[in-house]
Amino acid sequence: MKKIIALVLTLVMSLGLLAVSFAEANDQKPVIWFNRQPSNSTTGALDMDALTFNEKTYYVGFDAKQGAELQGQMIVDYLQAGGAAFDRNGDGIIGYVLSIGDIGHNDSIARTRGARKALGTATPDTAQGKTEIATIDDVNPAPIGTNTDGSSSIVKDGAITIDGKEYIVRELASQEMKNSSGATWDAPTAGNAIGIWAADFGDQIDVVVSNNDGMGMAIFNAWSKEAKVPTFGYDANSDAVEAIGDGFGGTISQNADVQAYLTLRTLRNALDGVDIMTGIATPDAAGNCLNDSLYYYDEATRCFYALNGAVTADNYQSFLDATAPNPLFNNQLGEDVAPKAKVWLDIYNSTDNFLNATYKPQLENYDGILNLEVEYIAGDGQTESNITDRLADPSAYAGFAFNMVKTDNANAYLAKLMQ
Ligand code: BGC
Ligand code: CA
């Protein structure tokens, strides 16, 4: 009899526990930030409250500085390999225009800084109290408007030696590509901007630098392909990689496969209550694992960062399909270790090239193998509430992955979980 009572008691207790875990408070569920790092859009300072919202909160992105330095170096290497051909009007100046994505987005800021530092056009970011440039963090990332005469105080003329001859390097123009409704990284805006720049001073433009491929390809298709002006982007979207065969200068892969996997993987691990490095630093039951050359984890800030690689005429053939799953981590997890779970994930802008053409297909590669039923929400790229309004019932989901419109707005999402 005692035994039976004990058994019944254990049963009741475990049922009770189950009930508790099902009714888990929304603010205790896993929260993964991705692509837009919770941070102050003016200073770049990380929003640690958002990053440590609960024990199951992480950020997944990529190493913006390493990638920005790579992009800058890729452009310099290209110029140095190509001889004097780039001074199209023979005035001794290599002129470039720069397409800026979002002046309040860490990735965009880093890329502007990286290009300027590598090309020698950087000035110290006095607004952040910088007086000299030791690293790319010290560079003023502000847009300049136009600077065809070299008089800007935000950038300066740089110098580059090509085939023994010294050229001036000048940022002729730069602009944040934001449309009238407020969408940033806006490719159509970049396509229009190059039309205006080319009409005003087209023969002075020898190189186009873009903070991403979406804007870079808009410029390439509108002008630089025909004008045969090398154009450099970032993201290694399939269309940009393919365009390298047609004269697109190059791009940077931010390893979207790694990021997409990490976004869902951290969600999975947090849900299962297993070590967060499962299937990341150590193989999971199905053999999925990353290798160290692909990412690193900063425990203090709970941020995972994928590493970047340059994609140029030398290697682009092996990057043509940006949506292919990575065989290192594409093995089906058993439902015994990772039971099916429903999660909510938004992509802030339904027209962002990188997120929709590359990142989302990569998420879709891995959602099934991780037994996650993902509800994908597409935002309008302009207003946070357009997205958060669609999270009417957080209790219907076991976890959340958030991609914000603006990096300062983490609270708009977290408020939904605290209601
Ligand atoms: C990508 C951009 C994209 C942006 C969106 C960046 O990491 O490189 O292409 O537009 O994220 O937040
Ligand atoms: Ca020139």
Image (cartoon, rainbow, N blue to C red):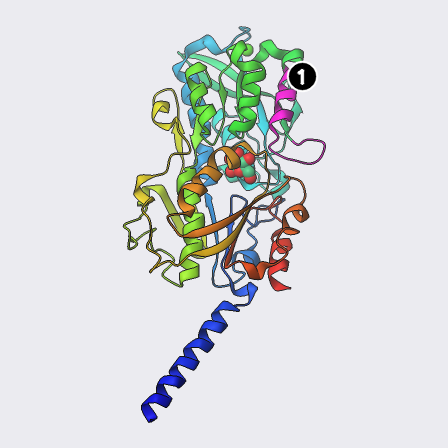
Task: Give the left or right position of residue 273, taking residue 101 as reference.
Answer: left
Q: Residue at x 44, y 35 (%)?
A: 67
Query: Is residue 53 inside the magenta stretch?
Result: no
Pick whichever, 351 or 221, lies toward us. Answer: 351
Q: Which quarter of the rendered picture does the N terminus lie within?
A: bottom left
Measured as percent of width and height from the top left, residue 231 is found at 50, 20
Q: Is residue 375 above or below residue 274?
A: above
Point 52% across, 30% down: residue: 212
Q: Quadrant of residue 190?
A: top right
The residue lying furthest to the top in this view is 90
Is 180 magenta? The answer is yes
Q: Residue at x 45, y 33 (%)?
A: 69
Q: Amino acid at mark 1?
A: Ile
Q: Nearer the viewer, residue 143 or 362?
A: 362
Residue 60: image location, x then y, percent: 46, 48
Q: Residue furthest bottom?
A: 1
Q: Tell me residue 285's x, y (percent).
A: 28, 55
Q: Which residues are magenta?
A: 178-197
Question: Dot 1 corresponds to which residue?
Answer: 196
Is the CB–ligand 2 distance for label 1 below 8 Å? no
